[in-house]
Structure formats: C-alpha cells, structure tokens
Image: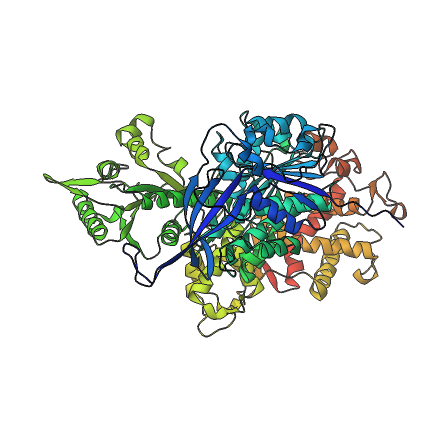
Amino acid sequence: MSPTRAPSVVVVTGDVTMDWNVARTRAVGSDGASWNARNTARACWQRGGAALLADLVEGTAEGARVHGPDVPRTGVCPDDPRFHHSYAIWSRVDDAWRVAEFLGLDRRPSGPFQDADAWNRVRDDPLAADLVILDDAGLGFRDRKDLWPRVLGDRRRHPWVVLKMARPVAEGPLWREMLDHRADRLVVVMTVDDLRRTEVQVSHELSWERTAQDLAWELVHNPRVNALARAAHVVASFGASGAFLLSRPDRSSPTRARLLFDPDGIEGSWTLDHPGGMIGYTTCLAAAIARRILLAPRRPDLEAAVQEGVAAMRRLHTEGYDASGGALVFPYDSVARTLAAGERPLTAADVQDPVRFLTADAGSRPARPGMWSILEDRYADRLELVVQRAAIEGVEKALPGAPLGRFGALVTVDRHEIESLRAVRALVAEYARGREAKPLSIAVFGAPGSGKSFGITQVARSLLPGRIETMTFNLSQLGGPAELHDAFHLVRDTALSGKFPLVFWDEFDSALAGEALGWLRHFLAPMQDGAFQQGQVVHPIGRAIFVFAGGTSESMAEFGHDIPGDTFRALKGPDFVSRLKGYVDVLGPNPRKGGPDPFYLLRRAILLRALLHKHHGQLFHDGLLSIDPGGLRAFLGTRRYRHGARSMESIVTTSQLAGKRSFERSSLPAESQLDLHVEARDFLALVQRLDLEGELLERLARAAHEVYREGLRARGETTAAAERDYDALPDDEKDQNRGMVRDIANKLAAAGYVMVPARSDEPPFDFPGPELDRLAEMEHDRWMRAKIAAGWRWADQTDKAKGLHAALLLWKGRSAEMTRGDSQSPFTPEELAALGPDPLPESEKEKDRDLVRGIPRILARAGYTVLRAGPAG
C-alpha cells in the first residue's frame, strides 16, 4: 500500500476587523427623516478581515488543517477596545442583502500592546506549513513582526505565501520580509484601486487594452511598485469584472502578463447592473488562489483561480449576504460551492508589452503604434468570415472574447473609438455629478455621415436616461450672431425646465460672412463663462452639454491644420480649443485616413445590422438576419459609401422590402439610385460575383485551357498540354486552370475593372489595354507560387516526373526582384530559392498575356462581361 499523504497545513492571519452589519428595512413612502415603527433595523456581527478569510479557506481547503487567528466567536460588543470595528448599512436590493452605505472604521485605540493581543496570534501556531495566507489591510499587522506566524521566521522552509495587500501597497516591514526571502513562492493579491492610490497611473474605464498595458508598465518599470514584479505572481483585481495577472515562473524567466476580463463591459460595469455594494470580493479571490495552490502546489493554476474567484464574487453579489438564520452573515457555503464548480466567466488574453517595439526592427513594428488590440490579435486572420457572422448573427456571437463598447443603442469594437467614447462618458458623468454652472464643451469630428451626433447622443442618454433633451443647430444655416443668440435662449429655456440640454452645433467650423471659422469667437464667452451678451444684457445659459460637430474637418488633428498659425490664432482657434474639455473622432463605414484600418468592415456589419433592425425588423428570425449572400457581400465590401452611414441607410430604406422576410438581391434599388450612394458598378459586381466552384468552375477552367491552346496555335507553337483536351489533362494541370479562373476577380480589381452579368448588350472592348503586362505578370506569379507549393523547382529543362520546370523564372529576373527589397517582393526567401536566375523568356510571357486577353471570353461562358469600374466618389 502507498503511504497516505499527510493533510496540508494552512496558516491564515493578518489584520482582523469586527464587521457590524446593520440590516435596514424602510416602509414605503418613508424617507427616514422621522421615526416610524414600520422602519426596522438589526445590527449583526461577524468576524472580518483575516478571520473571515480563515473561515472561508477552512470551508474550501478540503482535508487541510487551517490555523487562523484566535479571534472570539462570541462576546464581542461595538465598544470592545481590543478590535477594529467596521460598520455598514445593508438593505435588500433585487431580493438580495447588499451594502447600501459603508459607514467607516472605528480603529482600536493606539498605545502599547498588552496581552490583549493574544487573540490576534495564530491559533496553535505551527512551526511548518504548506501555505501561509496573510491579510494585510494596513491596520498595523504589517509592522508587528511579533504577530507574524512562526513559519515565516524559519527561512529554511519555503511554503507558498499569499499576501492579500491593501493600500499603501509594496511597503512596510512585512512586504520587505516577503520580498527579500519569499519572492519565489509569493502571490500578491490586491485591488487595482488600491494600486492606483500608490503613486501609479492606471487608466480607468477607457479600454481593457489601455488599462492592462498601463498595469504592465507600472508593475515592471515604476520604481515605486516595480518590486512587485519580483513575486512569482501578482493579481490585481477589477472586482467582478476581471483581473490582471503578472507571473514569473522562475528567476530566469521573463514575466508574462495576462488579462482576464469581461468582454461585454469594462472595469466596474458588471456591478452597475446589480446595484449595491458588497464585502468580501478580495477574500473570495484569495480563497480561490489558496485552493488552487493546495490542489497543485508544484504549478498552481492561477488563471483558473482568478476565474473561479470572480465567479464566486458574482455569486456573492447576486445572492447577497445570508439572512436565513436571523443574522446577516457571509454566505460561506454558497461561495465555497461556487469556488469548487470551476466556472469560467471571463475571457483571457496575453497583454502586449507596451515597450516591446522600442528596440524592434522596423519590419516587426505594429502597423498602428500604440494601439494594441485584443480584437486584432484574435480575428485579423479570419476577418471575412467574422464580418459576415457579425452581420447575420450579431457581434456578440461573431466575436466571442473581443472587448465591446456599448453605449445605449451603439455598439463598437474599435479600441480607438471605444476609448474616445468612454472618455467622453466619464466627462459627462463627472459634469452631471458636479455643480458647474457653465456648459460642458466637447468636439466631435468625423466624415460626413459617420454618425457623429448618434454616438454622442447614445453616450449621454445611456448615462442620464430620461434627462437628456437633444437640440441641433446647423451654424452654416444661421444668418448671423443674432440667430445664434436666439438658439442660446432656447437652450437656456430647456435648462430651466429641468432637462439636460444636449446641444449639437453642427458645422461649427464653417465660415461666417465669408470668414473662415467665423463662428468660433461667438462661442468663447458662453464656453468660458456660461453666459452670452445680447445688447447690454448678459444672459446665463445654465447647465448644458455643448457638442461642436465638425463639418469640414474629419478629425481633431485636421482642425485648422491647413490654416497658417498666425491666421489660426487671429481666428481664435487656439482659444476655442483651450475651452474644450474633450473630443471624439467618430469612425464611419469607410476606412479611416492615414493608415491601415482593417476593421472598417466590422463597423459596416454592425451598422448594417442595426439599420435593418430599425427599418425592417421582419428580416430577423430568432436573432438571425436573412439576407442574400451577394447582397451582404456588396454592403460589406463596396469600395466606399459616398455619404457615409447616410448612404448605407438610404440604400436600406429605398430597397423594396415591405412585407418580405428575406433581403433578396432583387430588392435592391435600381443602379441609378445606387449610384447616388456608392459606385454602382462596383456594388453590383459584388452582388453578382461568381461563386467559382463545382460545375461552373469546371466550365470556366475548360474555357481557360482553350484560350491557352488557341494562343499557341496562333503563334505556331505546341506543347504536350496544348495537344490535349481539358478532360485529358492530368489533375495538377487541371488545378492550374482552376487557379487561374479563381484569380480573375483579383486581376480585374487590380486593374480597375469589374465583372457583371451581360444584360445590356455591352459591346466587347480592348481588355486590358496598358495593364496587359502587369496582369500577365500577376498570372505568372500565381502559377509559380502554386508550383513551388507543390514542390516544383527550376531547371534548364522541364522534367515533370521530377518536379522541374524551365519556366520557374521571374518576369524580370531574380536580380531585379532582389533590388526591390524583401518587404516589396511577393515571394518569400524560400520561394525565391526555388526559382531560376534569368528573366522569363518572351515566348513564355506571351502565354500569360494570352490568358489575360482571354478573360472576357472565359467569363462570357458564364454570361458575364468586363466593365471599367467608375470612381468611388
């Protein structure tokens, strides 16, 4: 028989509080200002701090012997001077007891410590332990070495140590002892808010990516707290919304940062849906970590512990404290069951090192500096499929694990836009809580039709439901300052009515009486002083939110950039900007300027789904959008919407969808109507794009082979393939013809052509004109890549049996290709090594030209023609 493993020994100690929970009920209609017999209250007591943690660990550490502080379980009263007393008022919310108000802490009297401290020592303090859990709440335990457990005094022993630390973090004798002698098996647990109060800068409620990278930098590089990175693990808790985990497996390994987060919200958002506070969040997390250490002490799964700890927090919050026994106490059994259930409520992602690119080669740097995106990490390589699913199923199902920004009816996935809108939301929230008498001024920029007013309106209404009154004034249509004063009076009247005026000053950057930016000077006093002068009378405007929506600039960076500095100052541009409290650059359905923007397709999918839901809800069945695949492809892939979101909405509203349960391609507007909002040929070409598979693919591949044969015969040449019909070709040569056909759409797009159904007697034309050689080279490159992928190499003489081919030569030769640089070459170094050194002979080039010239004849077999695409507009 194998020997029975001895039970694990766990020591739990630290700062202890006596938690007094005042459970209060209030009669309907009672405000609590006067005595009422129907208002009831009951004071309940429980052991808090390290004692609470010890009790929870004892209920979750199966089979372990837990030694906690020797705190009495009875006989404590609120004026007992031995203890710290904590007070909170509790009330029932959503049928659960939660904290309505934290009243504060009554600290034990200061002075010399007597034998009365015996209760704060570990019960039956063992000399050896497998796990030590320390609850350092900043109430004196960190400074009292005489109260620390005995096992910490023996440096030959190396138990795991879980240090639950409150502010100020990373300081005091206890921390220095752990850092100097226990770091390799130390797990530090703290809240992000306690860390923020310790001379660090960590963003709040902007985006998960920003907050995570802020934490990664602070914990590794800020001298005030970077000693934390020497611990084996650091867990910074976002409460019920997630946690940040920094791990260092051993001294020689680099740290690894992981973010565990709720993709449907942001820090603090989960509890907004469940009003009320709670005591015991970090206790749940520490107990989850302790449980995982005991389960696998060699390599504890800290990520699983965080998941289970957050699941327990959520259960604790939704169910509230237990009042079944008459007293209001922590629900130990319910939390313990949740910790053991193994729930995974969060998504996990590696955090990109914020300094990783500072010394990297240029070729390995990000396309958009400073904008690491979890969305891009997860979905960049399968974007097309994800975009279609987002339109049909909804972004939540299409992008599991990607952070979403929700603002009322607005959903966005772009990190830049999420951060901008959340920054504005924070401004509005702070303004609404305060008493500032002058308006809050914000600017919003974006391309025409990008939805500037919609985004800000949704942010404000989601924050102040029922209190917002939206008002819009287009300055380009006002006759002058007198009409602006009339608008100010309307805003003032709305503010006096008790509503919050959300005032959009559209095209604020338009000219006034021929003067560029002429309106700016008339807003300086209202923005600065909250008043405007009409004649000799000064009128206060009151509390309002001013939103200045740009009409000529698509971003804040563009505002005034084309005006010389002295002129811009004379026009009061800098004075105006200095009075703004924030701004947003709104992204529409078109790609943003000035850099790669692969996720504009997702913006289109989200917008299309929202517009169809708004105007034609009958197209949705069990949450799924019913739409023709070609129509969806066109909505998502068309080159540009001429008037942004307004154009997409116009196409939706002018489509013939009344009474229909599916968006068929026949429901689309006529070509002339489409051309008002998109380049119609491009849009319709996407609608009608061939699905080149099955029988149709074989028919066009056969046609491509015939074009090849005809070209050879016309020049009096012959090859073994030219002497055979398509059906007699070996499979690899049939695949070459199929590949050529599948690539037709790419070649047409590269030369500015589209293929459309031949329904209007379009005459044949000279295709592709001056683009012939470029497209022929593209076809030859495609053919070579397919050959190389199949294992072929260049040789002076073609030998198909050995996989050698004399035409594996670059169009202009390998030396010319090398001068372009690897970053421009379509071939990898491995592919280039398989090619010959010389340029491709003219006789071989002519074969590729034949195939390009023959594209119209190949497509004609499917009833399609080739047309020049018009400008995107």
65 lies left or right of 635: right
Quadrant of res 728: bottom right
Q: Position of residue 660 (x, y in %)?
A: 48, 73
Q: Nearer the viewer, residue 198 or 245?
A: 198
829 lies left or right of 56: right
Q: Nearer the viewer, residue 867 or 388?
A: 388
Q: Position of residue 408 (x, y in %)?
A: 42, 55
**Residue at 37% across, 39% down:** 582
Task: Give the residue at the far left of this rendering.
Answer: 536
Q: Position of residue 421 (x, y in %)?
A: 42, 45
How many numbered marks have been drawn onto this rendered protein structure?
0
Rendered position, 239 above or below 132: below
Q: Nearer the viewer, residue 160 or 352?
A: 160
Decide if residue 763 is in sight here. no
Colouring scheme, one of rainbow, by chain, secondary structure, one colour: rainbow
Rendered position, 412 above or below 169: below
Q: Nearer the viewer, residue 45 or 175?
A: 45
Decide if residue 105 is in sight here. yes
160 lies left or right of 332: right
Quadrant of res 161: top right
Rendered position, 667 above or below 501: below
Quadrant of res 818: top right
Rendered position, 263 above or below 244: below
**Residue at 9% across, 38% down:** 536
Q: Position of residue 256 (x, y in %)?
A: 65, 36
**Residue at 46% across, 48% down:** 20
